[in-house]
Image (cartoon, grey):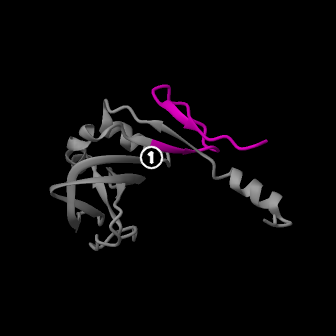
Amino acid sequence: MRIPANFRNHAEAAKRYQAGICWLPTDNFVDRLFQVCASGLAVFLGNKTKVGGSVTDSNGMRLARLAGTWNHATSAAAYKRVNGTEYIFWVNSHGPRYTAKDLFNAPMDGAWMDRKTTTSFLSTAARYGRPGIVIPESVPVEWDSFEPIVRAKHAS
């Protein structure tokens, strides 16, 4: 195997993408989920609440429409506040299925959830193990309640 001459440049760039994973406690789950997304981090979780499409709400946000049940692993990866309403962006793995118009032109592989929708959506999550957070190495974490399980280290 031949190592490229600019290997060190790639190694330095790769260090910026190291990550750690920690569990997110599920007490006050909705508040914690919004806090993590507002801080710029992503949460992964499993649940059984199905998102059956999307609608545009009065703020112009593509809001997830909950409908039925379906076992699935999902994530939440963004936060917005519009006219006093907080939203997180839920992401699915089924591709661009959520086509309602959106104020922020968010990707169609997910939809926004307000606190009411998020509370209903998370009602089945406790049965599917603990949710987790992916934390890039460059992000300082000061929350005492997180329990690190993996912390990627780069070679010095």
| Residue 62 vertical placement versus 120 (above, below) | below
Instruction: Using the image as rendered, state which of residue 94 and residue 91 is in the foreground.
Output: 94
Based on the displayed image, in which of its 4 quarters is residue 98 positioned? bottom left
Q: Measured from the top left, where is residue 93 in percent x and y?
A: 36, 63
Q: Measured from the top left, where is residue 34 in percent x and y?
A: 37, 43
In the image, taking residue 135 as reference, residue 80 lies left or right, namely left
* SS assignment at label 1: helix
Stretch of the chain drawn in magenta: 133-156
Check if residue 151 falls in the magenta segment: yes
Check if residue 24 falls in the magenta segment: no
Question: Residue at (37%, 37%) from the top-left corner?
Answer: 32
Question: Residue at (67%, 40%) from the top-left corner?
Answer: 153
List the single residue furthest toward the front.
Answer: 1
| Residue 78 vertical placement versus 139 (above, below) | below
Instruction: Using the image as rendered, state which of residue 136 and residue 101 is in the foreground.
Output: 136
Task: Note whether residue 147 is visible.
Answer: yes
Task: Note whether residue 79 is visible.
Answer: no
Q: Amino acid at mark 1?
A: Ala
Question: Residue at (33%, 52%) from the top-left corner?
Answer: 73
Q: How many marks?
A: 1
In the image, taking residue 88 as reference, residue 18 lies left or right, namely right
Q: Name the residue that disc number 1 marks.
A: 38
List the single residue furthest toward the left.
Answer: 68
Based on the displayed image, in which of its 4 quarters is residue 119 positioned? top left
Q: Measured from the top left, where is residue 14 in percent x and y?
A: 69, 55
